[in-house]
Amino acid sequence: MDYTIAVLAGDGIGPEVTAEALKVLAAVGERFGHRFATQQGLIGGIAIDSTGSALPEETVALCKSSDAVLLGAVGGPKWDNPDANVRPEQGLLGIRKALGLYANLRPVSIHPALIDSSPLKADRLAGVDMLVVRELTGGSYFGEKRRERGERGEWASDLCIYHQHEIERIVRAAGELARGRRKKLTLVDKANVMETSRLWRSLTTRIVKEEFADLSFDVMLVDACAMHLIRRPADFDVIVTENMFGDILTDEASMLAGSMGMLPSASLGTGKMGLYEPIHGSAPDIAGQGKANPLATILSSAMLLRHSLGLEEAARAIESAVYATVEAGIVTGDIAKPGQTPVGTSVVGDAVVARLAM
Ligand code: NAD
């Protein structure tokens, strides 16, 4: 089968890690008889430099005409001025909106070979296998923003707003995902102080009762969740939560796995189209040095095959090849254990490709 994939490499280590994912996609295509036609588009800082916009029209058109999108990362010190009118993150927010993507899936599991890379004690990590489903289009990141000067100096506000349909669609998506896993759903909110959270809680409780009675369901305040993610992470299965809570909790959860360089993500809407990217940023501190861990992006390409193209067997083959590479100790510095010699980005990519051919 032939599929088209738009590739938005972006800034910093984005081009380095997406290049490795593309090698892996070509290899898995070869093994299973699929052809992935890939086409590069501009996004983020590099797009600002060449077109003046963080998300040129051509990029949106390219993505819309593709089966799925693979993204590296955007941003960097060159474009860091928060007062600038055009900023790299506008590309990210813009493409999610243009493609109607509202559910961000971030799986966190820990391969036994990586337990020592985590700052947590090994006994806390056994059995960790969770999926955080973060709402992507609402909340304070998208509500009205104001900054003014009053009699007592400056003031600012970010309106946190959620509509019923935004909550219902993501709760249903999370419920379906929980059904395919260990059948446990946790809503994370701040219903003791926030009205938006109270709306989330009442709608979620009703939907679970009416449509997902087969799931075990609980609610947790976000501050308690931050604590339990460290205290008893293996107890979580599927977490569903609003945009900002999800943003913060998933970075925290990433440390369970030892490095942000290991964690993939998928952003999905109602159809098959999705955008797949590592959870990390453009890592300007290591960009251009061949040190970046490409595995989060390679695992994102596996999610792409699974969720957008329906190629489960090929997705699993990539995941197995990634874990075999880690088990063989062919790893970058972020996950190397004491005594292991770190290798470069492309050596890791080549090792995954070699294991796909085995
Ligand atoms: P970051 O994720 O880029 O880096 C945080 C730390 O993790 C750094 O020390 C970095 O070297 C390390 N790291 C990240 N990815 C790694 C990998 N694959 N391999 C090895 N080490 C890795 O976060 P930051 O430093 O806060 O942000 C840098 C830039 O990225 C900023 O401009 C920020 O706005 C942007 N950013 C973009 C995205 C995105 O594109 N989705 C997400 C977060 C941050």
Image: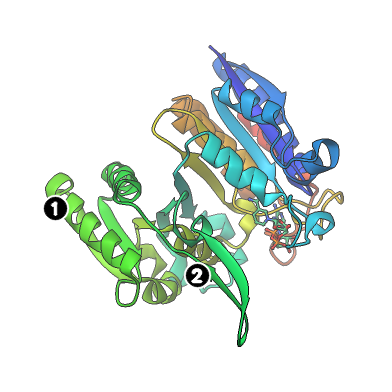
Q: CA distance from mark 2 to mark 1?
A: 36 Å
Left or right, 242 with respect to 18, comes to left
> Compared to 182, does 176 lie above or below?
above
Find residue 122 and name its label: 2
User: Between 258 and 80, which is closer to the camera in this rendering?
Assistant: 80
Tell which tag, 2 or 1, sits nearer the viewer: 1
User: Between 260 and 32, which is closer to the camera in this rendering?
Assistant: 260
Under mark 2, the amino acid is Ala
The image shows residue 318 at horizontal and vertical percentages of: 57, 34
Quadrant (top left, top right, bottom left, bottom right) of the C terminus: top right
Label 2–label 1 contact, CB within 8 A: no
Residue with the mark numbered 1: 209
Residue extending furthest toward the bottom: 152
Left or right, 173 with respect to 214, comes to right
Q: Residue at position x 56%, y 47% from top?
A: 264
The image shows residue 280 at horizontal and vertical percentages of: 64, 54
The image shows residue 68 at horizontal and vertical percentages of: 55, 28
